[in-house]
Amino acid sequence: MTLSAVMVRSSAPLARRNPVAKLVAATVFAVGVLATLDPLTPALAIAAELVLLPLFGVGYGTLLRRGWPLLLSVFGVVLTTILFGANRDGASVFAVGPIDVTTGVLTVALGLALRLVALALPGIMVFATTDPTDLADALVQNARAPARFAIGTLAAFRLVPLLGQEWQALRMARRARGVDAGGNPVAAARLFAGTVFALLVGAIRRGTRLATAMDARGFDSGTPRTHAREQTFTRADWLFLVGAVLLTAAILTVSIATGTFRPVLG
Amino acid sequence: MGAVELRGFGWRHAGRKAWAVRGVDLSIERGERVLLLGPSGAGKSTLLAALAGLLADDSGEREGTAEIDGLDTRKARERVGIVFQDPATQLVMSRVGDDVAFGLENRGVPRAELWPRVADALDAVGLTHPLDRPTHALSGGEQQRLALAGVLALRPDLLLLDEPTANLDPAGASLVRSSLNAAVSRETTVIMVEHRLAEVVPFVDRVVVLAAGGGVVASGPPARVFGEHGAALAADGIWVPGQPLPAPRRATAAPGEVLVTADRVALAQRLAPTDLSVRAGEALAVLGPNGVGKSTLALMLGGLLRPGAGRVVASAVLARDDAARPPHRWRAADLTARIGSVFQNPEHQFVASTVRAELAVGPRRLGRPLAVVDELLDRLHLDHLARANPYTLSGGEARRLSVATALASAPRLLVLDEPTFGQDRRTWVELVALLADLRDEGHGVLAVTHDPALVEALADRRLELAP
């Protein structure tokens, strides 16, 4: 599996936006949602996100397939909050053994779940519709990020899928040497630590070799780089950004107007 | 352009006592194609790195001079291109066209001029894929061709090749060699390091031999150097064309009991249903093109990977009281006492901090005496390295150690994945003799290999996997 393999290739109007614009828009939106603790704001945000989804060219089915680990973790958070949350105000709804599940704890759990989803969706939308190469190009060309950082990170990410194969090979090689945990948790922890160490040593070696190969092709020459692929930041990208800011403001306004707004700060 | 002049050149890596390379005097004219030879540890790769201007001043100590067209190598980097061994760590971008473009971007080539040069370079090496083809979808040989295109697009005057085919199977290696023949102009100076000589000798004009202790031993046309120094070079581990290998050894006795049987084993997308059995006292070679599942089969027989379908059955001779269970469900310690696996990459298997401790891991787990450790150190010529860290060994030494660790727990069956891959001639000869001895002592030996010479020298039986 590689990074580009998880991408949805789409010519939908918002998927085509400049990667930096998408990144900034998602950040603005997420910060807006994070600013308040009430459940209404994230609920509105999720509704807006789901409406916008087709404009990114991401189908609802695709979202479900990509997003199920998120749903799973949301479920975990909700369960933990219901069982162990400190807020036990409000009327008791039902009891699980000694644990009293109240309206108060349910509200907190619901708020948390909604915030998590509202926060994660923009991230999924951006990264599902953005080619990593395009993102690095746009960061360098439109956001003035240093190429050493953006292109270097991009190249390093290409080595990440190798780690999975390497891990499997190391595990099997250790078994072949007669090293296994045999159900002993201390031995299992030591085996895990040893394997992680070997994985890191290998990753550093590969990273060094890649850096050398990049420098051999002039990456460290100091000559001003040209860009083989052009990324432009157009009027449509500005409009998109403005739209994201307005949408965030609108949601917060509704939340304030209905009196549900509970700021995180203050 | 591309003339090389070395005067008393030497380099010592920071923190090392010994010089990696020293006392090298060498003049190479523009357009010459030079094959650089020397025993492992003679500093061939270090010399190439120096010529490519990749040895940072703060990473070691320099001696003498190294110049390209009268310029110090550190200032002549734009004139030099280098191709390394491993395709995975020299491709930078995720698409074919972008990768070739990477170096041109670094050199500040304007976009209008850049893409035609990308197309020319890909054309020259014979890669006909669309520019947006993901690089990970290419075969190893194609990836090395792409790496070569990325370097040639920069139009270097001096092209350095550091074992560009060492990580490839024979088909991939031949792809890369044909690209070199077609794409490198006669104006470009070439210096290459390569282990398997027979295939590259037609490409070069001159052979330069470095000595392990420093300096140049011989320099001249291939025929003359091999004629005068052939036997000495072969003894140093260099694969000199025409130097005879020891006579093949077949099993001295009829094969014994069946040790392990694979019954229609398969794994989705990796291995089609396959049958085989290995007997005591026989050597079986498993052959077939890349991607056909040879390594997967070796892992299954080694009890390391559970077959997706079919089963691996160990006989009572091998499994004793555990015969009812398949090898992949045995305890690891039991497994090493019965089946020894040697991986393609020896470093994956190292778990201790010295060579001696590494050899003691197996016997200690099994509660057996450690006398076998000294015996193996001696038998595999590792005694002088007993206290070295396994990660610091040379390729040949690491390979011998990985075989020794498998032998330390005295398994009846040995499963080896490409045991001779990238080995110098001396290690190769020793390894083949060792495997033949083990077979004649009654071990079963299964080797997955691309190496026709190994099959010729050792195999009693061969199994060819078809795609």
Image: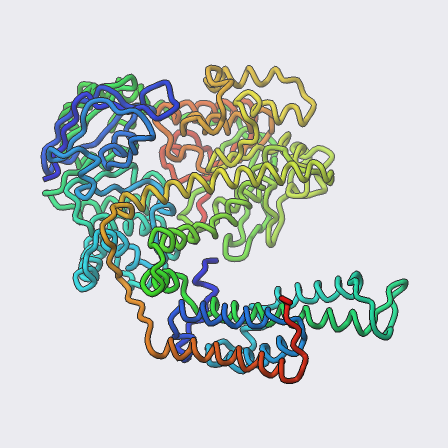
Name the image quarter holding the C terminus of chain B: bottom left
Q: Residue furthest front?
A: A266
> In this orientation, which residue lies closer to the viewer: A53 or B276?
A53
Q: Can you give x and y, in whole percent of width and height, for residue B350 in the image?
A: 53, 31
Residue shown at the point (39%, 40%) measured from the top left: A208
> In this orientation, which residue lies closer to the viewer: A114 or A186?
A114
Is residue B65 shown left or right of residue B166?
Answer: left
Q: Can you give x and y, in whole percent of width and height, for residue B272 in the image?
A: 51, 54
Q: Can you give x and y, in whole percent of width and height, for residue A193 in the image?
A: 61, 38
- Vertical arrangement, residue A84 with respect to residue B71, above or below: below
| Tag count | 0
Residue shown at the point (40%, 48%) measured from the top left: B289
Name the image quarter holding the N terminus of chain B: top left
Residue shown at the point (59%, 42%) measured from the top left: B304
The image quarter containing residue A34 is bottom right
Q: Is residue B244 visible?
A: no
Is residue B127 shown left or right of residue A7?
Answer: left
- Vertical arrangement, residue B310 with respect to residue B333, above or below: below
Q: Can you give x and y, in whole percent of width and height, for residue A76 in the image?
A: 71, 63
